[in-house]
């Protein structure tokens, strides 16, 4: 299949491809999404195929208004309404009970559906023109870092999707926060730009999946996507100063021999006595988050063998950033 590169003033063409059951990647404020008509089961199956995505990992539905939510969800509950009022449009995905007519391909067989309203003019305009909610997971091959530029999307998906809308690099660079309101208490399944504390200001009883995990040991309904390998470049990812990774395995940070081609990314400079092929010092955590996935991809292009990421404090988007870095560092 030939992949068309579309300008942001060609959204009519993009909408026509979606109406015909095709796949179009488009920019959002988090990462690029790979969009299809959320009401078309065969188009949804094409997304799994194009991404090489495991079929048990459900997708996020993108809507342009609250009316769109009711096309895929059973209802807008009072807590959903509160979250919508506080955080939409924006990087908060809400998992809610699915509507009766929703195709099971969309939810990977689960009784719930994940929905968000992006805060991005191109994404909103595309959804409006398509006239249907758009199902859109991150636009990358499964397991790879999410695409934060149209070039990254092209590198991963050219030949597997019908078109890419070539917008600007994304604002946040990390995927949305995912909150599940079908559990009691509501639970943040994936950290993102909207922090747990910001959500707790609106809904004080919300917990994080890590808190529940510690308390409930195994009885937990986790986000299916978190079970899979994620965010990984070809280079080995390591965390500066960390002795163990997210799974508790011992890491060989700083023990890589200087013969290995290494890159550094962080908020400060690394130890200058060590050999670094590339050093990227970001001005603040927002910039670090925005840069992370495209840095991973750039280092792969340069053939760097190991990427050392400086640890940051886990406040605000720092928590999501550390989550992605730690998952990228897991060896499987
Ligand atoms: P992606 O769009 O590729 O970033 O992945 C979507 C994320 O949303 C994955 O982590 C999914 O597991 C999660 N997700 C989507 N639908 C549901 C659902 N019904 N229940 C729980 N998590 C979901
Ligand atoms: Mg993804």
Image (cartoon, rainbow, N blue to C red):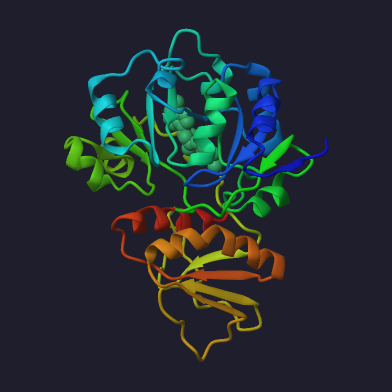
Residue at image position (46%, 57%) is 326
Residue toward you, 251 or 86: 86
Residue found farthest to the right: 1
Residue 280 point in image, percent of width and height: 52, 75
86 vs 9, left or right, is left
Residue toward you, 281 or 105: 281
Residue 120 point in image, percent of width and height: 47, 42
**Which image quarter holds the N terminus?**
top right
Residue found farthest to the top: 100
Residue at image position (45%, 37%) is 118
* Rendered image quadrant of residue 202: top left
Residue toward you, 318 or 30: 30
Residue found farthest to the bottom: 273
234 vs 312, left or right, is right
Residue at image position (60%, 48%) is 167
215 vs 287, left or right, is left
Residue 200 point in image, percent of width and height: 20, 41
* Rendered image quadrant of residue 201: top left
- The answer to whether residue 227 of the structure is visible from this angle is no
Residue at image position (63%, 24%) is 44
Residue toward you, 65 or 94: 65
Compared with 100, 6 (above or below) is: below
Count of marks overlaid on the render: 0
Compared with 271, 183 (above or below) is: above
Compared with 102, 323 (above or below) is: below
- The answer to whether residue 100 of the structure is visible from this angle is yes
Residue 230 point in image, percent of width and height: 55, 48
């Amino acid at each position: 299949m030939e992949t068309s590169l579309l300008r942001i003033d060609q959204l009519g063409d993009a909408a026509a491809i979606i109406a015909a059951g095709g796949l179009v990647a488009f920019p959002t404020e988090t990462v690029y999404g790979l969009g299809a008509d959320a009401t078309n089961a065969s188009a949804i199956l094409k997304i799994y195929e194009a991404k090489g995505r495991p079929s048990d990992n459900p997708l996020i539905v993108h809507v342009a208004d609250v009316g769109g939510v009711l096309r895929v969800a059973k209802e807008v509950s009072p807590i959903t309404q509160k979250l919508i009022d506080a955080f939409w449009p924006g990087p908060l995905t809400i998992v809610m009970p699915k509507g009766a007519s929703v195709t099971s391909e969309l939810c990977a067989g689960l009784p719930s559906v994940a929905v968000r309203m992006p805060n991005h003019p191109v994404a909103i305009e595309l959804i409006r023109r398509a006239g249907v909610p758009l199902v859109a997971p991150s636009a990358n091959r499964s397991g790879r870092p999410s695409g934060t530029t149209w070039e990254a999307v092209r590198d991963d998906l050219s030949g597997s999707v019908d078109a890419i809308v070539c917008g600007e690099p994304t604002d946040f660079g990390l995927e949305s926060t995912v909150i599940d309101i079908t559990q009691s208490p509501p639970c943040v399944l994936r950290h993102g730009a909207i922090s747990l504390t910001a959500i707790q200001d609106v809904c004080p009883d919300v917990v994080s999946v890590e808190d529940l995990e510690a308390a409930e040991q195994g009885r937990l309904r986790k986000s299916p996507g978190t079970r899979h390998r994620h965010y990984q470049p070809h280079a080995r990812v390591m965390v500066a100063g960390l002795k163990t990774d997210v799974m508790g395995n011992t890491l060989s940070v700083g023990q890589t021999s200087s013969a290995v081609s290494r890159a550094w990314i962080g908020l400060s400079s690394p130890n200058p006595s060590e050999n670094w092929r590339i050093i990227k010092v970001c001005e603040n955590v927002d910039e670090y988050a925005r840069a992370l996935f495209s840095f991973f991809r750039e280092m792969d292009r340069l053939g760097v063998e190991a990427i050392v990421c400086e640890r940051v404090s886990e406040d605000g988007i720092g928590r999501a950033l550390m989550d992605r870095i730690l998952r990228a560092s897991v060896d499987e």
